[in-house]
Image (cartoon, grey):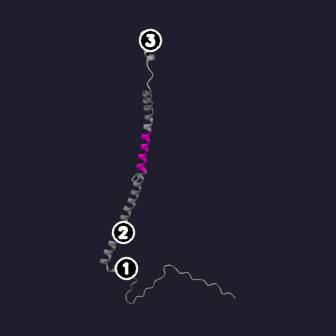
Amino acid sequence: MPEESVQIENNLARKKPPLLRERALYQAQRLWRPAGTVVAVVLALLVTWHVIYGKHGISIWQQKRAEDKALQQEIKNLQQENAEMRQHIQHLQSDPDAIEREAREKLHYAKPGEVIYTLPTQPQRQQQTPPAGK
């Protein structure tokens, strides 16, 4: 056994140092791995930024979604207003008293012999004249 250990030591001592090409390859492999990791992380960050803030990103999508909700609410309100107007039109077409009331209130029509008095909606201020000097 002692002879084997001496022989192994002799083999290690006789081993030639690695060639320049082998050392360069080893150094390149050792340096490229972290550099590749950095490049991959940078690319992942760029893709993430583009997904959030890009032309069709999440922030733009949320703005469009809020705009869509506002427009849907406006459509709903206008449909409700249209339904109320249709009901009012139907009421005017079927009820003569309703037609007369509309004519009196909005158009200020009167029956023969009636007089309509219209009061101003806001009281007018009377201008005070300063007292005449001596």
> How many angstroms separate mark 1 from mark 3 (CA)?
122 Å
Q: Which residue lies furthest to the bottom in this view?
A: 113
42 within the magenta span: yes
Question: Relative to 89, is 34 on the left or the right?
Answer: right
Say which element carries label 2. Answer: helix
Tell me the number on the disc at residue 102: 1
Residue that numbered label 3 is attached to? 6
Amino acid at circle 3: Val
For the residue pair 38 and 103, the one nearer the viewer reads as 38
Amino acid at circle 1: Glu
Amino acid at circle 2: Glu
Tell me the number on the disc at residue 81: 2
> How many angstroms separate mark 3 from mark 2 (CA)?
104 Å
The quarter of the displayed image where residue 112 is located = bottom left
Query: Badge 2 local density, few (<14 within 10 Å), some, or many (20+)?
Result: few
Discs 1/3, front: 3
Discs 3/2, front: 3
